Image (cartoon, coloured by chain):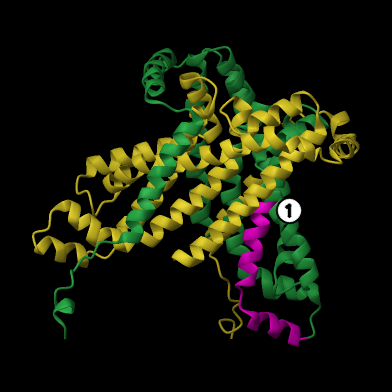
Amino acid sequence: MSAGALRRRAFPPNWGARATALGLVAYAIYALGQLDITWARLVIGLGEAGRFLARMWPPNFSRAELLIEGLLESLQIAVIASALGILLALPLGLMAARNLSPWPLVVATRGFVAFCRSLHYVIVAILFVKAIGFGALAGVAALTIASMGFIAKLFAEAIEEISMKQVEAIRATGAGFGAVLIYGVLPQVASRFIGFSLYQLDSNLRNSTLVGIVGAGGIGGTLFAAFKRFDYDFVAAILLSIIALIFIAELISGWIRALLR
Amino acid sequence: MNALMREWQRFTPLERFTRWAVYFSLVLALVWAVRDVEIIPEFLIDAPEQMLDLLARMWPPDLGHYHPAVHHALVETLHIASLGTLFSFIFAVPLALLAARNICPYRGLNAFAQLLLVTSRSVNSLVWALIFVAIFGPGAAAGTFAIAFRSIGFVGKLLAEALEEISPGPLEALNATGAPASHVLLKGAWPQIAPAFWGVALFRWDINIRESAVLGLVGAGGIGVVLDDAINFFQWDRVATILLAILIVVILAEVIVTRLRAKLI
């Protein structure tokens, strides 16, 4: 054994990691320059943040009627969009599963599902607002597209992981495609499908409080209007109510998940 | 005889009743929502026609508009997403260390860090953008901070979970040699969470690329500003170009992230 090997350090310097870190720092400095973010601006911003927070306190709940109306509409948008999205995702998920469908159908469905997920729901909401007018309908349509893409992808992945033995057993009895689905495939994925659906209901509720910013119904419109009027105490009230609503919804969905397990 | 004929049932009657009650209340919620939501029937009826009309106006996309306006906005969006992700780690890593119960032994600090992480997560990035536009004024700075503050909760939560799952052996061995806390973290904890760390960073970067595309709608910089202008001027062929650009970047980012993840993990 050579002397060099004996003197090998226990923790040699990791030059690759150091170079990566240096590269990231260099990029950060370059990007800061590009985006025109300077120290002076941050200092001014800190002062403004103090004023902003001071004007938010105390939250103003005097327009509770408007607030509750908006929250309820958000809730309705979330519930309808989730139901429609789940309904549409069922066939799409089956069509996108490689072990059940012929490959041309799989490729076409996966492309469509990926397209649905690629565009942010707020962008989709703008397009629907322009096409079918202001209001809850546009929000429902936008969130339906997003939920459909999300659930269909996860559902297809869950189906691809099932055991094919049960499917073969049902097929061996001479069952048709429908019977194979109902007795061989769905029992294996039903619990995960319910899990995805509940998760999507939660995330639709979060998102439905936002689509109003572009005029697609719900509390978001009220929030955006309050921001524009510099009604920061009402903004604080709306934000607190949204957080409370989401928190309660998460408690309920966690409770349902435990019940259905 | 009767005992042998007993039919096997998976759930007790009480379980079946609660399941039925849960399904029933979900259906009830749906019925309430459909009956009560304010949808104007005329809008619903001519929706397909209007959608087709919009698509017809978008076709063909005005690709000549891409350079330079859309291109610069797109690069700005990429900077906002990447810089926002980098910034979030400055806050998320210390908070994750404080939130992990095996690293930080003080329960009070754990709970405090968790509270900050939850707050960051429960405010959407568009709302963060509204807040930072009020603070910094319109522009990319607001967008970068919005992305960073929304990401702190996500990254911090996942890092804290990864930290709580590490094996205590290496940490104890390093402690036994008398190594200072920084060395214990760097040589004991870091090698164990490095794959999770890079996975989380890439995953969040991918999400941030998508989210930063819409921040411009509230004035926080990036391609959303150009999109908002084009929509307000009803220049649908330009809107189509911008949407195509966003779509291509989002898909490219997803491909890059998938490749890098496969390589790193």
Give the drawing colour for chain B: yellow
Residue shown at the point (64%, 48%) measured from the top left = B249
Chain in green?
A
- According to the picture, the residue beneath numbered tag 1 turns out to be A87
Q: Position of residue B33 (x, y in %)?
A: 70, 36
Q: In this view, does B61 lie to the left or right of B175?
A: right
The question of residue A35 being in magenta is answered with: no
Query: Please, is residue A163 above or below residue B172 in the view?
Result: below
Answer whether residue B34 is visible to the viewer in this image: no
Residue in front for this viewpoint, B20 or A31: A31
Q: Is residue B239 left or right of residue B1?
A: right
Q: Position of residue A34 (x, y in %)?
A: 50, 33
Residue shown at the point (22%, 64%) measured from the top left = B168
Query: Please, is residue A83 above or below residue B233 in the view?
Result: below
Chain label for disc 1: A
> From the image, which quarter does the N terminus of chain A lie in?
bottom left
- Tell me the magenta residue range: A148-173
Residue B220 in which image quadrant:
top right
Residue shown at the point (65%, 80%) measured from the top left = A164
Residue in front for this viewpoint, A69 or B223: B223
Q: Where is residue A39 in the image (x, y as percent from the top left)?
A: 37, 25
Q: Position of residue B212 (x, y in %)?
A: 57, 38
Residue in front for this viewpoint, B244 or B88: B244
Kind of residue sitting beneath label 1:
Leu
Q: Is the magenta stretch mostly helix, strand or loop?
A: helix
